[in-house]
Image (tube, rainbow, N blue to C red):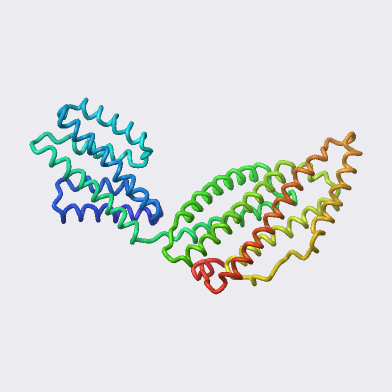
């Protein structure tokens, strides 16, 4: 069983909320603990946005609850109608994330049937808000998130697996069903990477220098994700047309394998370069400018012409080669762009080393 930072922060936030409620001698401190559960967020920025929405949502819930309690009393039906109105108002003002806690506030206030109902409603509202503020403080100071490390670790792990399967697929060594299952898992992991990127993008820095550096890093991580997508698309094509690739002449198939090995190795080097393990000026792009695709494209054209002549004899479409090579060249272009971004970043920020990133990998 693994306990993540958010699980620990939730427990601490509950304890802190109950502690504050007892210090302020608020009745029913349990509602502060419940509010802390709803208010805890995975990032500081989201916690800031959440506290703004929770305040607005709970003001709506408390206002409706007090009005209904004063006008219609504490009948069960009145509580239900008040809840419906609160839901409608929350959606109207686009405060959906605060809906659950606003409804808790409605029930917490309208269940009281004694005297001084208005005073009680204010106290219950303050109790809930104590829980919200407690969650925000815990999220701010307890186990600050390190989303960059998590993001890079996820990208690195996913890309490493894709490269491994691509090398196998290029040699027709992978089993069809296993590759198909792996591709499905890769798609799910890529979706998780996108979510983690959003968390990292939401991080805020007070220093102008750090904000500028993070803005450049965001561009690199965005390109890292795009390049990973391109490598995954290429693996999809190799998997889909594995039988057609098997039927290619040996010299042409070996040429595809060599080019793939070249690109996959370069991709691995780029990740090493970004973590400071490789010199910024080092590059494996040894092809002359303007001629890097010449040999590949020339052989592709020759092979397509050859395949068109023999298509009547064997079931093979030369368009399959276009599908594969379009993904191959697209992958290559994105690797080039990624290399340019990393070199530029290291040239401007090479002295500002990310020790955590460099020490946690390789």
Quick check: 114 left or right of 44?
Answer: left
Quick check: 190 left or right of 324?
Answer: left
For the point 16% across and 28% down, which residue is it?
Answer: 71
Q: Residue reaching furthest top? A: 77
Q: Residue reaching furthest front? A: 208
Q: Is residue 79 above or below residue 38?
A: above
Quick check: 133 left or right of 348?
Answer: left
For the point 37% across and 49% down, which residue is it?
Answer: 49
- Placement of the C terminus among the 4 image quadrants: bottom right
Q: Residue reaching furthest left? A: 115
Q: How many marks?
A: 0
For the point 34% across and 61% down, which residue is it?
Answer: 142
Residue 163 appears anywhere in the view: yes
Residue 116 in the image, given as x and y percentages of width and height: 9, 38
Q: Quadrant of residue 282?
A: bottom right
Residue 43 in the image, given as x and y percentages of width and height: 40, 54
Front one among 263 and 254: 263
Q: Residue reaching furthest bottom? A: 351
Q: Quadrant of residue 257?
A: bottom right
Quick check: 59 left or right of 289?
Answer: left
Residue 1 appears anywhere in the view: no
Front one among 304 and 347: 347
Residue 353 in the image, given as x and y percentages of width and height: 53, 71
């Amino acid at each position: 069983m693994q306990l993540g930072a958010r699980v620990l922060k939730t427990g601490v936030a509950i304890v802190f909320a109950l502690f504050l409620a007892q210090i302020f001698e608020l009745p029913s401190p349990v509602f502060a603990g419940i509010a802390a559960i709803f208010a805890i967020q995975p990032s500081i920025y989201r916690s800031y946005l959440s506290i703004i929405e929770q305040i607005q949502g709970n003001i709506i819930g408390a206002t409706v609850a007090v009005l209904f309690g004063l006008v219609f009393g504490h009948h069960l039906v009145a509580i239900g109608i008040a809840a419906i109105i609160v839901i409608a108002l929350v959606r109207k003002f686009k405060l959906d994330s605060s809906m659950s806690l606003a409804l808790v506030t409605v029930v917490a206030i309208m269940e009281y049937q004694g005297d001084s109902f208005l005073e009680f409603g204010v106290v219950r509202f303050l109790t809930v808000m104590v829980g919200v503020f407690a969650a925000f403080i815990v999220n701010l100071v307890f186990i600050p998130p390190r989303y960059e490390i998590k993001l890079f670790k996820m990208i690195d792990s996913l890309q490493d697996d894709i490269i491994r399967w691509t090398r196998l697929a290029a040699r027709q060594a992978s089993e069809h069903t296993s590759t198909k299952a792996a591709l499905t898992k890769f798609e799910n992991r890529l979706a998780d990477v996108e979510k983690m990127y959003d968390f990292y993008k939401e991080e805020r820095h007070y220093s102008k220098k750090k904000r500028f550096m993070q803005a450049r890093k965001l561009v690199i991580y965005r390109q890292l994700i795009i390049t990973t997508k391109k490598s995954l698309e290429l693996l999809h094509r190799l998997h889909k047309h594995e039988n057609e690739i098997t039927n290619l002449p040996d010299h042409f198939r070996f040429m595809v394998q060599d080019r793939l090995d070249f690109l996959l190795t370069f991709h691995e080097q780029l990740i090493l370069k970004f973590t400071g393990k490789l010199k910024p000026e080092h590059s494996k792009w040894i092809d002359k400018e303007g001629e890097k695709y010449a040999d590949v494209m020339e052989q592709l054209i020759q092979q397509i012409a050859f395949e068109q002549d023999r298509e009547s004899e064997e079931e093979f479409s030369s368009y399959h080669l276009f599908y594969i090579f379009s993904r191959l060249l697209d992958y290559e272009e994105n690797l080039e762009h990624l290399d340019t971004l990393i070199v530029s970043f290291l040239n401007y920020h090479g002295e500002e080393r990310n020790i955590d990133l460099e020490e946690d990998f390789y």
